[in-house]
Image (cartoon, grey):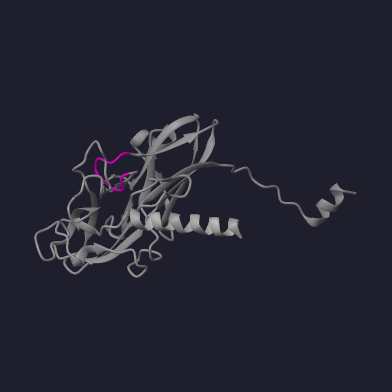
């Protein structure tokens, strides 16, 4: 009974610490929204919630969401997820080398509803960034097709890209990387890089995703999840599996 009570207490304490870590309200602030003030204002119209009712997952899970209606002209706009006071360290995405740079979105004009998401939790293994991931469903113009590019020659040395395929909001490409070691990559709009996604979402001056290969000619699967703004690259074994009939299996063990 003491063990059960102890485990229950530990789990309750952990849950409380997650909930209290982000006590202040957050807002999707940017040039796309003025609300009751000027552009980049924070008010009830662009506040994010962690209540399970605003596209944020479950209540109290450390993921915030909101559907914000743009009241500014159509086109490209900057945005950040932050608090009402622009508290240092509470603004995402955040690149320490370029603290004034912002994420971007593209709206069709006033009245366009944009779904925002902020996740302060640690990511699943392999996904980047680990915490502080932002996303929105207008992160690039409708119909944009993505490719993966990067530092390895097989990824074009940043000059050309490898086509990616989108399924259920996840863009994927598989590429063999010849030389083992540390590499970098981004997803970008095919052929031009007008819209690109790295560890700081789609900042113009955001850092790249990173990955490591451990052996020569490694098959690497690259992913970009548009739902949460995280990227992923991992080696995998793509050796074809030899399929055998039941008769062949019986013959092996006679």
| Above or below, 110 relative to 234 | below
Identified at 43% across, 61% down, the residue is 168
In the rendered image, the residue lying farthest to the right is: 254
How far across and down, in percent of the image, does residue 161 sit? 37, 41
How far across and down, in percent of the image, does residue 199 sit? 34, 43
Residue 101 occupies which quadrant of the picture? top left
| Above or below, 223 relative to 5 | above
Q: Is residue 208 left or right of residue 31?
A: right
Task: Tell which of 84 and 35 is nearer to you.
Answer: 84
Q: Is residue 23 left or right of residue 58?
A: left
- Please state the extent of the stretch shown in magenta in the rendering: 200-207
Identified at 62% across, 42% down, the residue is 239
Task: Tell which of 78 and 14 is nearer to you.
Answer: 14
Task: State whether the magenta stretch is mostly helix, strand or loop.
Answer: loop
Q: Is residue 203 located in the magenta-colored stretch of the structure?
A: yes
In the rendered image, the residue lying farthest to the left is: 38
Identified at 37% across, 33% down, the residue is 157
Q: Is residue 30 left or right of residue 59?
A: left
| Above or below, 70 relative to 150 | below
Q: Is residue 84 located in the magenta-colored stretch of the structure?
A: no
Identified at 54% across, 55% down, the residue is 6
Residue 1 occupies which quadrant of the picture? bottom right
Determine if residue 240 is in view: yes
Q: Is residue 101 left or right of residue 11?
A: left
């Amino acid at each position: 009974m003491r063990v059960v009570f102890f485990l229950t207490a530990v789990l309750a304490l952990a849950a409380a610490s997650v909930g209290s870590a982000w006590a202040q309200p957050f807002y999707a602030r940017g040039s796309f929204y003025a609300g009751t003030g000027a552009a980049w204002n924070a008010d009830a119209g662009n506040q994010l919630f962690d209540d399970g009712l605003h596209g944020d997952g479950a209540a109290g899970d450390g993921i915030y969401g909101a559907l914000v209606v743009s009241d500014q002209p159509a086109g490209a706009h900057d945005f950040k997820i932050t608090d009402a006071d622009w508290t240092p360290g509470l603004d995402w995405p955040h690149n320490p080398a370029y603290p004034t740079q912002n994420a971007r979105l593209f709206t069709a004009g006033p009245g366009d509803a944009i779904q925002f998401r902020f996740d302060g939790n640690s990511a699943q293994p392999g996904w980047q960034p680990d915490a502080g991931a932002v996303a929105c469903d207008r992160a690039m113009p409708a119909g944009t097709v993505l490719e993966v590019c990067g530092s390895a020659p097989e990824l074009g040395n940043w000059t050309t890209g490898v086509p990616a395929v989108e399924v259920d909001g996840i863009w994927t490409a598989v590429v063999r990387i010849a030389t083992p070691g540390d590499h970098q990559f981004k997803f970008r709009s095919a052929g031009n890089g007008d819209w690109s996604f790295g560890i700081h979402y789609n900042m113009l001056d955001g850092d790249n995703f990173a990955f490591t290969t451990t052996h020569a000619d490694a098959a690497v699967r690259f992913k970009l999840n548009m739902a949460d703004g995280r990227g992923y690259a991992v080696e995998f074994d793509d050796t074809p599996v030899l399929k055998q009939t039941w008769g062949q299996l019986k013959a092996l063990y006679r």
